[in-house]
Every structure is written in structure tokens, then in C-alpha cells.
Image (cartoon, grey):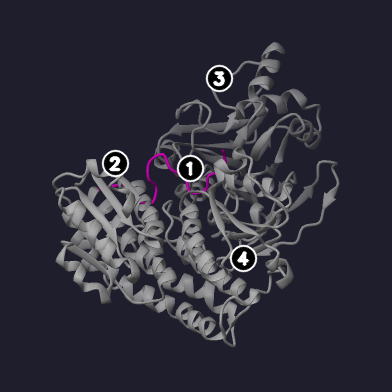
Amino acid sequence: MCGIVGYVGQDQAAPILLEGLAKLEYRGYDSAGVAVYDGTSIQVVKSKGRLKVLSDKIHGGADMTGNIGIGHTRWATHGKPSDVNAHPHVSESGKFAIVHNGVIENYLELKSDLLEKGCHFVSETDTEVVAQLLDYNYKGNLLEAVIKTLKKIRGSYAFGIICKDWPDRIIGVRKESPLIVGLGKGENFIASDIPAILSHTREIYRLQENEIAVIQADGVTVYNMDQEVIEKTPDHINWDISAAEKCGYEHFMAKEIMEQPKAVHDTISPRIKNGRIVLDNITLTKEQLENISRIMIVACGSAYHVGVVAKYVFERFTHIPVEVDVASEFRYRDPIIDEHVLVLVISQSGETADTLAALREAKRLGARTISIVNVVGSSIANESDDVLYTWAGPEIAVATTKAYSTQLAVIYLLAIYIAEKMGVISEADYQYYISELQSLPDKIAETLDSKAHVRAVAEQFYQKKDVFFIGRNIDYAMSLEGSLKLKEISYIHSEAYAAGELKHGTISLIENGTLVIALATQKRLFEKMMSNIKEVKARGATVLGVTTYSNQQIEKEAEYVFYIPEICDMMLPSLAVIPLQMFAYNIANLKGCDIDKPRNLAKSVTVE
């Protein structure tokens, strides 16, 4: 959520800022703005609405002269979306301009103190307080003013700061919100995510907690809070630029759905060598694994749904009891944790605020931690005992697809790996599951071949107001994600239920024409699912079934069916999710929704 871009160099800054912000639109926002030093003063232009409104206002940046500036796309937290509340925010003297991702928790206390000192405020935001506090603390030394200000504030932040008295530099600093420094030739950048600067440089510094970067055109110096210089080693980004572009697809979501066979292959293939799962970065020993009494999984959103699937997978393979928590609730229920608990943390960005807080709570209580993340060097990755990267590449659409699929792939790898280390799986079963895992990318590709059929079915239902998803066991876990995909991009009200639970109240909402999507991929539960399908049909529902090719008798009850290939039952969610993703995408497209940037949503939720 929110996007930050900063530039200092020889070129005109404003067009570069707009270009970078356009690459961050996927993060979700409701207003945008830029601040550029023009040689005399800091000029600020900002506007509510899409980035195009801002771009049109300054004619693509041509109206703003100057070679240093900062830009921002805002996702409202403090104060409604408006021109005034949009970033950048400027101090009363006009000396400082600042952009901010995160939340300043003690801003009211600070604001009250500054009001008593005679400061005047124009916005409702917490960020303006930081701009005014910087000005108040400034006595001629910019770095000292920044550090003094940071010591006064509590909360999460990534800041980009420019000062009229120091017109050759940008200050970048982060705490619990991501910020990178892009290293160019005669120019340098800051950004909240890599796509913003990928067309200009592939060399970056990843700022760590409380690191302060002073960015000038000819170099970057990073300090700690004691003003000591920190030596940083650049990371090279090896993404194809096309990985962050649409490449002919109408939407990023469509592209990322189709990228899933490759993404899953890239996640699995390097970790299977000579018929064995090799997780080189996992330091858990056999003895430690045998002492694990419980696995706890914490995540948010779609990553939480991966966790629900993982509960079934881990309990089946390892025989270890598993609990799954929504990360935002985890630390507030006083979880019972000790050194015998393994906590598995799942996050695409590795910066999800609630998940990061849950990780820290688990570590404080003595748990062993493993994280599954996509972004190398992210906060969650850095703070976990072990990390497994999904290597999905950039995911731009707000609604996750390939990140979800690669997280599932890592779950399978880890569960089979642990089961083998603990000696609770036979060699024959181990080799069978390895073979099934290796077949997954091709079977995902085969499932994607049904996209024309999925589109045709979507055309029958895109005007529905309510949809229910039902399933049993791991199909129920899968239905949670199918329901979320539909509601988040099409705005259709959708609910997911364990199929046996529907009759305990919610079946009262089923009426003539209600669409019920019934997942029935599990052979041992297929007959029970057929009974549940009959129950909803008796109340007038129209049923769309999702099952394997061997269960074609579902057509006796379901009006429409999405078929998927056969694979071992624990891996069926990786195939069942594909038609549900395509169905949600086509429904939203038929409705004319803003698929890549659904309303009120953000890609990376870095505030609680």
C-alpha cells in the first residue's frame, strides 16, 4: 500500500517520478503527488484520484523544473482522500517536504506539542506532523535533524525527505515499511518497490531497520542512528523488465495467471536433486524436528488460505498437529508457545505488518520460525530463523495468483521434507509424492487450457449478486481462496463454507438462481459432496462443480463443471484454484471492473 519514488540526478525529476509512480499503481492508492526543488523553492503538486489526474495537471511532469524530487501514491489512513491530505507534505516554513508509508502511532501527542509551540497544520494526516517536527528540530545539520525526529516518533515508516537548504540530496529511512535505494550512474533513486526504478537500474540497496540513506547524484551513504557509516553491498535484480510489464495481456492478473506453470516450476525444480528434496537453507535438524509438538501457521488474506490448506497437508504428511491463525489476531489471543512449537509465517511481500508482528511475538515466546516469502531481503525473511523463497518473480496485480500457487508448492516441499526427515513416510510414498510434485507445472498448464470454457461459464453468471462456495476437507480450504478471488475483484458478495456446515443456518439464504460453486475433488468425500449439492439444488440453487476428470458423475447434479487433471489429493488445490482464478477474472472483466487495482485494496498491507 502507498508508493514512494525519489530521484536525484541530471535529468528533469518530475517525469521520472510519474513514471515510477505508474509502476507502483498496483499497490493501491487514492491520491498522488510530487515535490520538486526548482532551484529556488520546493514546488508541490498533488491531487485526489488516479495518477493520470496528477499527470494531466503537470503535463506529464513538463511543468515542474528541477533535478531532485519525491513522489507518492497514498492509500488513506489518517484523513479522507483529498488534495490536502495527499502526499508530499510540506513544513510550514516550506523548508521540508516528506513522503511517508506507514503509521505514526504517537502523532496526536506530537501534534499537540507542536501546536503549543505555534505550528499550524493544514491536513488531517500523521505525516504532516513529521514534516513540522523535522523543521522544528532543524538547526542547520540535516542528518542530526532527521535522527532527532526519528527518536521522537513511534510507529512504522518509510520516509523520503528533501530539504531546501540541502538541494542536492534525498534522505531515505525505513522502519517496518520497505524502502530501497536504486544505484545509477550520475543519478540515484529511492522507491518502495523494485518495479518503480527497474527501467533505470538493476543495482539496489535494501535498507534495513533504522538505516538512514543520504542519496546524492554521485553517491549514496548509509548511516545508523549513531551517525556511523554502514557499509552496504548492492543486490543485483535479475528480473526481465518484461516481468513487470503486461506483455500484451489486457491485465497483469491475466498475465500472472498464465505465468503459474513457470512460477511453480521455478519454485520446485531447483529444490529436487537426484530424486530428493534439498532445502539447503533450512537448518532444522532431525532431532529438533522430533521435538516439535505443534506447528502454528500465521498469515493474512490469501496467504492465510494457503495456511489452511497447509494444515491438512502437514497433518497428513508429518502427523504433527497444526493450528492456523489470522496474523492480525495471533498476538492478541495470548498464544501458548514454547521452544517446542514451530511457527510457519507466510507473506508474499515479507513486509505485511500484522504478519511481521506475529513473527516477532512468536520469537519472543521462544518458537522456532520458518518464513515463506517472495521478496528477498524483506523484513520477515531477515527476522526468521529459516526462510524459503517462492521465487515467483514480481506480482503486480493486487489479487494474488502466482504467489498463492508458489506458496502452496513450498508447503508441499516442506511437508514432504519434514516427513522424510522424521521417518514417518515410506521411501515408496516419498518417491510417489516427488513425482506428483514434479508433474504439477504441466498439470497447471493443462488446466489453463480450459480458459475458453471458463469464460463461457462466466458469461452466464457475471450479473449475480451472491455466490456461495462449498467444499469438504482440503476442498473447503480451497473454497476460501476461490471466494476471496471473486469478491475482491468483482465486488460480488461471496461466502465460503464447509459443505456440511451450510445446513446449520446459512442454507436459508439459498433461493432460486443462487449460484453455488461446489468443490468435489476428494474421492473419499465425493458421495458426501453429491448429497450437499442435492441439498442446495432442492432450494433452487444453480450448481457449478469443480472436480477431476474421473468424477464425471457430478454432471447428474451440477449444471456446469470445471474439470481438472488427476494428481494426489493433497496437491489438488494447486489445480482447483486455477479455474476459480480464471472465473473470478472473467466475471470482473465482464463487469468492467478495475481488475489490477480493485477499490479500497492494496497489494502490500504495511499498516495494522
What separation in Å lies between label 4 and label 1 (alpha carbons)? Answer: 45 Å
Disc 2 marks which residue? 505
At label 2, which amino acid type do we have?
A: Gly
Q: Amino acid at mark 4?
A: Leu
Q: Which residue is mark 1?
A: 62
Q: Which residue corresponds to mark 4?
A: 388
- Between marks 3 and 4 in the image, the one whose residue lies nearer the viewer: 4
Between residues 492 and 526, which one lies in front from this camera angle? Answer: 526
Q: Are marks 3 and 1 in contact (CB under 8 Å)?
A: no
The kind of residue tagged 3 is Val
The residue nearer to you, when weighing 369 against 96, is 369
First in sequence: mark 1 vs mark 2: 1
Q: CA distance from mark 3 to mark 4?
A: 46 Å
Q: Nearer the viewer, mark 2 or mark 3?
A: 2
Answer few, some or many: residues within 10 Å of disc 2's Cα (few below 14, many 20 plus, some between 14 and 19).
few
Give the dominant element type of the magenta stretch: helix, strand or loop. loop
Label 4, residues with CA under 10 Å away: few <14, some 14-19, many ≥20:
many
Q: Residue at coordinates 74% horizontally, 44% vertically from top-left?
A: 210
Magenta range is: 592-608
Q: Which mark is residue 122?
A: 3
